Image (cartoon, grey):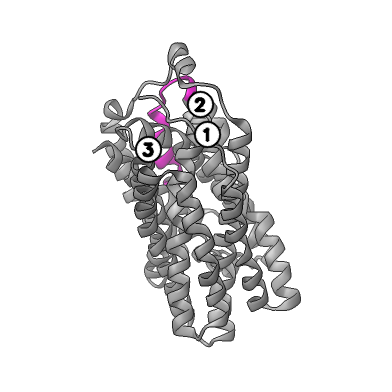
Amino acid sequence: MGLLSLAAGHFMVDMVVGALPALLPLFVREYRLSDLAASMILGASLLASSAVQPVFGVVADRRAAPWLLYGGVAVGAVAMAFTGLMGTYLAILGMVVVSGLGIAGYHPEAARVANRLSGGRPATGLAWFMVGGNAGFAAGPLVAAAAIPLLGLHTTLVFIIPGLAVAGWLFLQRSRLATPVMHATARARAGASHIPGLSLLMVITTMRTWTQFALLALAPLLLVKERGLSEQAGSLAVFVFSFSGAVGTIGGARIADRFGGRRMLMWTMPPAAPLVAGVALLPTGLAIVSLAGAGLLLMASFSVTVAMGQEYLPSRLALAAGLMIGFAAIGSAPPGLAIFGALADAAGRETAILAVASLPVLGGLLALMLPAPRPVPA
């Protein structure tokens, strides 16, 4: 029940993040925003919800903080709901930042608790937590798309009721989710941190993140602008990518629990490369199938890298989660988007996607050099 509650919270906060790109056209039309101003809204959300996570991780490692769970969901959902009621661009930006801070507060504490509730199988326990987020990120655009024709700019209000409902449930479960933090003796037993291993793992995760977000940005444009799909079909292709990633998260965790995270990374990242290339090279129908396969393999390591990060930083589980989720899995995306976006402008979207296909191969090769982490003691 504890892991399912955490997954429900993760679903809610990531649904808010996933819906924001679908809401941007409403803000652009209503407030006559430039592309730069619209991009700043998304950038502010990304920065606030990811870059601050390590700070919340430090807090959560010192004392159990179940208030970050129900409080994070409530702040993240309600603040995003209020963006549709704001009268100015700066007010929208402010609400997006507040929402992002709530989302940032949720992730490290939730990942720490998920690790402690995993019963000695951290990759699988974290996978159920992560799959809630992946599913929420995929559902966000669908929820927004369904509500926009009916509510227009007030579509953001659809987040209030489910957000408060999930926050209320987490509040009722707070005693179950208030798992104690490690004390001094437990920290000593956990062993020393392995900073070089953690740093290399963050680089590998960044390769996956750049691949994921570059596909999210370029694949719909390729399919709609150059292959003639409708915008609705392009959005559905993105949903297929995200949904297959959620399925891959569970399968990858089972592989990692049996064979180890390092082997799992070496087995799943390089095979994703031809599937990424297939998005650019194959006919439209097969390109969508290839996109789904790429999502399945790429996101298979999502929970695994978080669990490995916690093994490299065994006495600071929440901080490790904040670094792996907030920075490596999300916060590292903007430079990659800039690089491959510029390449797409200069040489075409197909060329950019083919270049992106090299990243999973590089990540798999780097995984060969990962040191073997020590399991986190129960």
The Cα–Cα distance between marks 2 and 1, rounded to whole angstroms, is 6 Å
Quadrant the N terminus occupies: top left
Q: Earlier in the sequence, mark 2 or mark 3?
A: 3
Element at badge 2?
A: loop
Looking at the rendered structure, the kind of residue marked 2 is Arg
Observer able to see residue 164: no
Looking at the rendered structure, the kind of residue marked 1 is Ala
Part of the protein shown in magenta: 61-77
Give the mark toward the camera: 1 or 3. Answer: 3
- Residue in the foreground of this view, choosing between 354 and 114: 354
Judge whether 88 appears above or below 369 on screen: below
Element at badge 1?
A: helix
Residue at (39% x, 64% y) in the render: 244
Observer able to see residue 101: yes
- Residue in the foreground of this view, choosing between 377 and 25: 377
Q: Residues within 10 Å of mark 1 (few under 14, many from 20)?
A: many
Q: Quadrant of residue 120?
A: top left
Judge whether 85 appears above or below 1 on screen: below
Looking at the rendered structure, the kind of residue marked 3 is Pro
Residue 316 image label: 2
Q: Tell me if 146 is positioned left or right of 332 in this view.
A: left
Q: Are marks 2 and 1 in contact (CB under 8 Å)?
A: yes
